[in-house]
Image: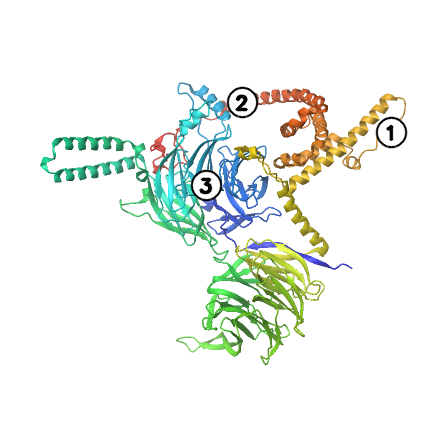
Amino acid sequence: MVKSYLKFEPSKSFGVVVSPNSNIVWSAPPRASAKATGAGQAIVAANEEVLVWDIKKGELLSRWRADNQRANVTALAQSRTDPDLFAVGYDDGSIRLWDAKIAAPVVSFNGHKSAVTVLAFDKAGVRLASGAKDTDVIVWDLVAEVGLYKLRGHKDQVTGLHFVEPDPVVPAEEDGDDQALVTMAVDSEGEGFLLTTGKDALIKLWDLASRHCIETHVAQTSGECWALGVSPDLSGCVTAGNDGEMTVWALDVAALASSAQKVDLSQTISFLRDRGTLHRSTKERAVEVVFHPRRDYFAVHGVEKSVEIWRIRSEAEIKKSLARKRKRRREKLAKDKAKKKKGDGQDTEDAEADGAEDDDKAEDDVSSADISDVIVQHVIVRTAGKVRGVDWATNPGSKDLQLLVGSTNNLLELYAVAGKDKLKAKGDVPDYSKALAVELPGHRTDIRALALSSDDKMLASAANGSLKIWNIKTQACIRTFECGYALCCAFLPGDKVVIVGTKEGDLQLYDVASAALLETVNAHEGHAVWSLQVHPDGRSVVSGGADKTARFWDFKVVQEPVLGTTRTVPRLKLVPSRILKVSDDILSLRFSPDARLLAVALLDSTVKVFFVDSLKLYLNLYGHKLPVLSMDISYDSKLIVTSSADKNIRIWGLDFGDCHRALFGHQDSILQVAFVPHNSDGSGHHFFSASKDRTIKYWDADKFEQIQRIDGHQGEVWALAVARSGTFVVSAGHDKSIRVWDETDEQIFLEEEREKELEELYEATLTTSLEQDPDAQDAEREVAAASKQTVETLMAGERIAEALEMGMADLNALREWRDAKAANPTAALAPPQRNAVFVALGNISAEEYVLSTLQKIKPAALHDALLVLPFSAVPSLFTFLEIFARREMNVPLTCRILFFMLKTHHKQIVASRTMRSTLEGIRASLRGALRRQKDEMGHNLAALKVVGLQIRDRSVKDYVDENWDPEVDGTSGQAALGGGRKRAFVHVS
């Protein structure tokens, strides 16, 4: 009989506040609830998930994770029109649109070959642009749910994206109603422009109507461009690269708007103009440039522990600054004149005076002012950790500057920054303060050790600088302690005290109930404590360290006097009892569950087994080529399993020290092994191993077989703990996440697992081999189709081919039956035997079945699925398209498939005579169907316009200043600049 095992599945994941792979997004609360909560939400990446935090309460509101999604989140963007719609880009090149209300993906796209780096929505929220490490920019249609086109031009990863959609230019002489109509007409025509930057140091401006690049500049002289920020009024942008260099660009929006309506453009027009270079206070490479949506500030940061906030001066300030400079220069000129000798002559003085006057006139022009006079550094915000993402926190009604900062050390902070208007004196330095933070639900550094309580309800996780106690069921952090660089930890009997071994050589005792440090013992004289274990009887503990000793400690309750009183209180103390000296550093040690033996792993790659009572050597285990990093002894004390940096696992018998089997376990060092106490068949010889290769594996030590491979962690798996009940496993790793894997009732058969792994490997190689390399001429083209073959599209293509085959067989059988009936009308011919699938689906027709198959395929995957079809299947597809057109069955889908197939197989279709009659039939039917649909849509649009006019006439008139905008903060001096529009570079470009 084939042996079966029970499968372990992921059940919980916690411990991550924000991961350092993606930017962060601030979402302001709706106006109705703004007063209730007073703060908005932070949408951040957490490995493969997206987390929504209430920044004020520090609560996790929502967790977005797609099924079978293992790739990291690498980019986030929020729609400008629908605040509940978010685009999320992943490490594998896929993009998903999430609805925040239902916390579920709405649409998924697949077009990039590598990680998505940046995402941007357009003004109307109907298009999404994505840039990736594969150097391509893809524009997606969110209404039709398809990729429109791929823009090629950058030679390295895309680092910045922004839609530039200027308001259309309307002639001034038009009167009110006509002007509105002209604006609508012009706006509907233009597709706008796209501004992109790449690591190749280029900034490109793309015309999306003609789909080509109209302008390219070198953005950074220092070699790479890493960030792009565009001002809200589109009048300029800032690019940032290496060496702390930032380039400011003026964007001629008016010229762009007028050019959208012209066919022929002269080559001399330059829409982007270099305004100058600014230098940040640090030389680190920049990561982001983020403009404030309503005020004249922008934030820029690199990978250092600070965020620089820069301010754009108002026109009055710039003029004042220029006047000061002019005054200083005149004073200097006057001094120079006074020093000159009298014999120099009057002509020279007149020439100098004329030159000074010319300079003054030039400086009066604000647009030619030096960029350092226009943009000045406001303040540098020093943060607790290295910054990975920032966003401006803009709450309705709030006038303060607030900045949300996500750090690489798993920390989310909100800073309040004083604006220019809050400064009392001229020379005051703007102040900032940390208003709120989300820090409790995670460690700042990698978790190095895990320990479960005896009832499996509490979990202790230890890292460099912190020890946290978690409730496994609720995933809540109960206690946080400050500690040294923790390397190992364990619960003491009773689960009220946790012992931690540190890199500094200390053993620290923490009381969970009172949240206090009970005692610190310098156990190994400054040498790291690599391992510790509590004796099976619970009365003592042994610690092993880099000082080549294993030290035994007894627990003793001592009555300590309370200072100033006669009372005493009981306190737990560690009392040294015995010392075992060995020849090298101890990396791991383990008691056998029967308390008879102690196994010690040394730095010289050997394992020595001693008797616990006499500390005499019992066995030497030789075999590993590199040091043993972890080991465990089975619960019947018969087997010992050791894992090493040589990527091997060895299973030994404790009777004679013989090596039962050496298994090549992982692709990198194996950091932890642990036996399952009581598995399903009761032998207790199943164990888990965790490695630097990001996987956990489940093994049978009797059959020497791998049972299951568990993927999920995005970094090295440092620590592993198996529940006493054996029903779940907890792991923690470099990605700062703590993951719980539960045993399910689903059975695993080893042969099926091997087949599944081979299938995954085959599918991975299949999609890459099918991804055709572009032809030489196609590779040089700026525009290409936004397509990518995935396993999903291959399967969809196979389903279409199968449906066409079944449908054609059914059509032929029906045609033969009708011909026979027509030839012999009097004969009682039985109807043909139909396919069982059609009968099961309610005796539907062949064309209905083919159409339902096509409709079930996601629009984004349809084109790639149709590419899978061989040309021999195209005539049968066109046969069905002709039926669809004739019967007006889903005309939009019919047109889409027809035009795509014509474009793809144009040469072969044109060369085929047999398809001509089919195409003519499709054309006749489709023209009639489309004409009817066009008339219907025109009729409905006209009716809607009439209804809209009626509603407008009946509605109550609101007497509000048309230029007033409540969103614009009055203190920034922008409302006075006309229509409440933002001003950033408009007066200087």
Residue 945, numbered label: 2
In the displayed structure, does residue 6 sit left or right of residue 229? right
Residue 480 in sight? no
Depth check, mark 2 against mark 1: the one in front is 1
Please rate how many residues cluster around mark 3, counting C-alpha atoms within 10 Å: few if below 14, some from 14 to 19, many from 20: many
Q: Which residue is labeled 1 in the image?
A: 830
The answer for how far apart the CA atoms under marks 3 and 1 are is 72 Å
* x, y percent for residue 660: 68, 68
Residue 200, numbered label: 3
At mark 3, the secondary structure is loop
Which corner quadrant holds the N terminus?
bottom right
* x, y percent for residue 428: 28, 47
Depth check, mark 3 against mark 2: the one in front is 3
Q: What amino acid is labelled 3 in the image?
A: Asp
Where on the picture, by quarter, is residue 858? top right
Where on the picture, by quarter, is residue 95? top right
Q: What amino acid is labelled 1 in the image?
A: Ala
Q: Earlier in the sequence, mark 3 or mark 2?
A: 3
Label 3 with label 1: CB-CB less than 8 Å: no
Q: Earlier in the sequence, mark 3 or mark 1?
A: 3
